[in-house]
Image (tube, coloured by chain):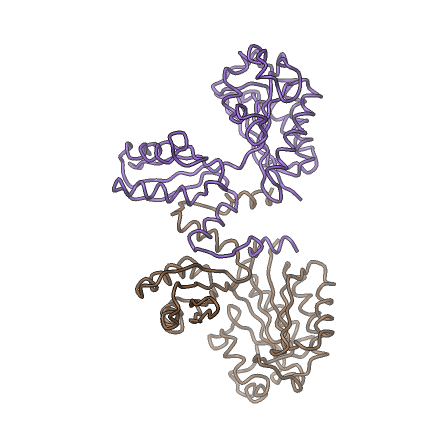
Chain colours: A purple, B brown
C-alpha cells in the first residue's frame, strides 16, 4: 500500500473553531491519518500534516476545501505569512511504497477535482509543475492574493485547472508534489558568526553550493556558539552525509571544529540508512536486509 | 505489541517431509509468522526463523516439539553440526517493543512447558542462563548427545527444567534469549592473508579485542583480496561503527586500505540508525523522529 504524506497550509491561524472543524472533517475520512496540526496567530495560518493512501488523502483534502472555502475570506485576511488562497498550498510527499510520480498524479487528480467542485483556480508546483516558471512556490505566490486578479489576466499565469479568474473570497491554490524536507543544523565550536555565515554561503545552492540545500549562519547566543542552519529539500540527490562532510571540510579550512549536528523534527529512515551505508562503505546493501522491513512484509 | 524473533534449530536436514510438517504446524498458529527456513543435508539440520508476539511464538515452538520429538531419534542421527537434541537450540530475540527481559521470561515459560509436555530436559542459555557456565551454547553442548547421559549424572549439569536424565530419543534442548546477530565482513585492498588474520586477532574478543565480536581472516581467492569475516553478537554494546573504525585503524597500521564492507543477511534498523548518529555527530536524536516510525504509531 503506497504511503503518502500531505501537508496542507490553510490561511486561518486565529479562529480555532474553524481549524478544529477542518481537522475533524479530515479525521472522519477513513484511512486519512492526522499526524500533526499547528496554528500561528501572527502568520494567521495553520499547517496540518496527514498521511495515507492516495484515495483517502484526496478525499480529506476535498473535505478541507469544503470548510476552508466556505469560512475563509482572503479579502478580510491579514497575517505575516505570504498567501494566495484560503487553502494556500497542498504538497504531496512520497514516503513508503510510493513514487514521486504517484504524488504528481495525485496532485493532478486532486487539483482537477478542487477546480471542478469549488471553482478555485489551481496551480501545480514543484515536481508537478507544468513549466519551469511554476516550480518554485515563491514565484507563483509573488504579489500574493492582492495582485492575483491582475496576475491571472496575463496569459502565462493561466491556471493548470479551473477558472481563469480568482475565486472571489478563496483566491487560488497551489498543489504539487515534493520530497520530504529535512531541517538539519550543524553546530560549530566557535562564537564567530562570520565563519557560520561564510560556510552557509559556500554550501547553499543559491550562492553556488550544493543542490537542494538552503543555509544560513546563526548565533546561538545562550550557548556562545554558532550554527549553520539548513533545509535539505531532496535528500536523495543531496544526502545528509554530503552536507555534513561539506560543512565539516569548510569549517576545518577556518580552523573550526564541528561540535555536533541535529535533525529538527522528522527524517525519512532512508536518509539515515544511506548515511550508514556511506560511512561504513557498505557494498550491495538493500533495504530488504533491514529486519523490521522484512518482518513487516511477511 | 512486542515483536520477538525466534530461530529454532532442529536436528533434521535430510527428510524434507518431516521439516515440511514442522513448518506447516508452525504456520497454522495464528500470529506466528514464518520468515525463513533452510535445511542442510551434510549438517543434517534445519534452521527455521519465525516472528511474532510471545504467546503465538510459545505455541509455535510447542507444535514444533510435538513433531520433532515424535519423528527425530538422536540415536540414529549423524551430521557435521554438533547437537544435543532433536530440537537442538531455541533462541528468542527482542526486535521491536520487546525487551531482553521479555525474551528471558518467554524462554523460561516455553522451557517449563516443553519439559512438562514432552519430558525433555531443558537448559537455559545466553541471557536466560541461570549460571555463568551455561551462558555459552558450546559449553552446554560439549560432548554432544552421545555423552549427555554421563554429563547429566554430574550435579552441575542438572537441567533448568524437566527430568534429570536425557529423553531417550530427543536428548535435551537449549532454550534462551540473545541479541540479534549481525554477520559483518570488511574487505581489504590486499591479497595478504596474514594482515586479515592479524586484524581479526586484534578485534575479536577471544584474543583480547572488542566484546561481542567473533572474527577470522579469510582469502577471497576469486577476487584476489582478503576479508575480516565477523559475527557481532551484541550491536548495542559493540556497535557496527566501532568495529568498522577499529578494523580500518588496524588496516592503516599495516598500510592497507578498507575496500568496502558488507552485511550478510538481516540487520536491525537501530544498528544502522546509531551508525548514522555516530558519524553525523547527531545530538539529542530520538527514534520518534523517524518519519516511518511516527506514521506507524499514529
Image quadrant assignment for residue B79: bottom right
The image shows a total of numbered marks equal to 0
- The x, y position of residue B41, in whole percent, is 64, 77
Q: Quadrant of the C terminus of chain A?
A: bottom right
Q: Quadrant of residue A95?
A: top right
Can residue A297 be seen in the rendering of this structure? yes
The residue nearer to you, when weighing B161 against B266, is B266
**Residue at x-position 58% and y-position 65%:** B92
Front one among A101 and B101? A101
A23 lies above or below A237:
above
Q: Residue furthest left?
A: A255
Report the front residue among A166 and B274.
Answer: A166
Residue A256 position (above or below residue B31): above
Identity of the residue drawn at 47% across and 52% down: A277
Rendering coords of residue B259 (x, y %):
41, 59
Question: What is the x, y in percent for residue A199?
Answer: 33, 35
B257 displayed left or right of B184: left
The x and y percentages for residue A70 are 66, 17
Image point (60%, 45%), residue name: B296
Relative vertical location of residue A56 with respect to residue A114 in this rendering, above or below:
below
Question: Residue A153 occupies which quadrant of the picture?
Answer: top right
Give the left or right position of residue B262, taking residue A51 as reference.
left
Q: Is residue B228 visible?
A: no
Q: Is residue B31 left or right of residue A157?
A: right
Quarter of the figure that contains the N terminus of chain A: top right
Amino acid at each position: 500500500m503506497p504511503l503518502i504524506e500531505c501537508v496542507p497550509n490553510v490561511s486561518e491561524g486565529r479562529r480555532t473553531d474553524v481549524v478544529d472543524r477542518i481537522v475533524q472533517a479530515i479525521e472522519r475520512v477513513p484511512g486519512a491519518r492526522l499526524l500533526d496540526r499547528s496554528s500561528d496567530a501572527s502568520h494567521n495560518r495553520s499547517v496540518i500534516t496527514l498521511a495515507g493512501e492516495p484515495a483517502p488523502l484526496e478525499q480529506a483534502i476535498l473535505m478541507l476545501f469544503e470548510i476552508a472555502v466556505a469560512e475563509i475570506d482572503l479579502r478580510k485576511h491579514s497575517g505575516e505569512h505570504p498567501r494566495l488562497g484560503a487553502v494556500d498550498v497542498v504538497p504531496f510527499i512520497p514516503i513508503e511504497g510510493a513514487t514521486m510520480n504517484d504524488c504528481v498524479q495525485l496532485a493532478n487528480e486532486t487539483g482537477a477535482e478542487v477546480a471542478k467542485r469549488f471553482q478555485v483556480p489551481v496551480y501545480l508546483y514543484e515536481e508537478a509543475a507544468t513549466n519551469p516558471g511554476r516550480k518554485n512556490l515563491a514565484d507563483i505566490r509573488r504579489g500574493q492574493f492582492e495582485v492575483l486578479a491582475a496576475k491571472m489576466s496575463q496569459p502565462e499565469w493561466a491556471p493548470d485547472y479551473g477558472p481563469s479568474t480568482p475565486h472571489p473570497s478563496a483566491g487560488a491554490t497551489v498543489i504539487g508534489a515534493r520530497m520530504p524536507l529535512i531541517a538539519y543544523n550543524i553546530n560549530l565550536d566557535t562564537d564567530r558568526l562570520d565563519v557560520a555565515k561564510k560556510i552557509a554561503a559556500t554550501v547553499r545552492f543559491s550562492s553556488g553550493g550544493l543542490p537542494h540545500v538552503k543555509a544560513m549562519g546563526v548565533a546561538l547566543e545562550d550557548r556562545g556558539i554558532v550554527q549553520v542552519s539548513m533545509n535539505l529539500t531532496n535528500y536523495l540527490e543531496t544526502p545528509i552525509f554530503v552536507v555534513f562532510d561539506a560543512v565539516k571540510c569548510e569549517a576545518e579550512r577556518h580552523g573550526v571544529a564541528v561540535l555536533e549536528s541535529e535533525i529538527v523534527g522528522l527524517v525519512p529512515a532512508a536518509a539515515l540508512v544511506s548515511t550508514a551505508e556511506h560511512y561504513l562503505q557498505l557494498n550491495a546493501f538493500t533495504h530488504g536486509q533491514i529486519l523490521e522491513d522484512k518482518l513487516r512484509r511477511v
